[in-house]
Image: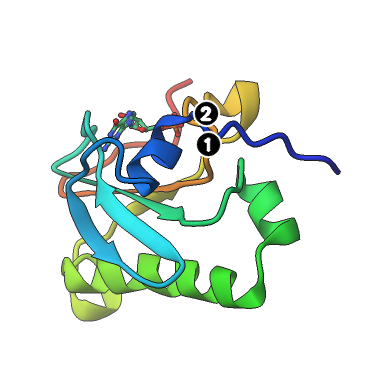
Amino acid sequence: MAYDYDDQNIFAKILRGEIPNSTVAETDHSLAFNDIAPQAPIHVLVIPKGAYVNFDHFAAEASDAEIVDFSRLVSKITQDLGLAPEGNGEGYRLIANSGLNGHQEVPHYHIHILAGRPLGPMLVK
Ligand code: 5GP
């Protein structure tokens, strides 16, 4: 599979420091920051620093170290924000949009962490 990464996408510009962001956490391979248009009281985006278009690209071509770093950072954030059910948190939702039907707007792989209110059914019909 060939993946076509557009290095002018907004998250690439954030990673290059060309536009500001509200950083939540940063690791060697990943960055987490607040969504500019939050859909819930907590709306954090987690992105790999590498140039991956979407989940499939990341799963296929990221190194094991990048994948572990990314997954652990998502989990660290849910725990640090007190969201994880195992820490008596009220829970959260992870979303990774991809492609047309997924309504992915920014073509740099990211996970949305949404929380802070009941999030309703998984999808609006
Ligand atoms: P997608 O639809 O691609 O899954 O979600 C893209 C997300 O990026 C949206 O929730 C949108 O609000 C967010 N976003 C778009 N531009 C910016 C920006 O410049 N800064 C931040 N922090 N978030 C952005």
- Residue 105 vs residue 14: left or right? right
- Which label belongs to residue 104? 2
Label 2 Cα neighbours within 10 Å, binned few <14 / some 14-19 / many ≥20: some
Of all residues, the one furthest to the right in this rendering is: 1
Residue type at tag 1: Asn
Quarter of the figure with the N terminus: top right
**Residue, x 38% and y 65% (percent of image)?**
74
Label 1 Cα neighbours within 10 Å, binned few <14 / some 14-19 / many ≥20: some
Give the residue number, with chain letter if any, for mark 1: 97
- Where residue 10 sits: x, y (%)? 40, 31
Q: Is mark 1 within 8 Å of ligand 1?
A: yes
- Residue 43 vs residue 71: left or right? left
Q: Residue 64 falls in which quadrant of the image?
A: bottom right
Question: Does residue 84 appear in this view?
Answer: no
- Going from N to C along the chain, the mark reached first, 2 or 1, is 1
Relative height, residue 103 to residue 30 (above, below): above
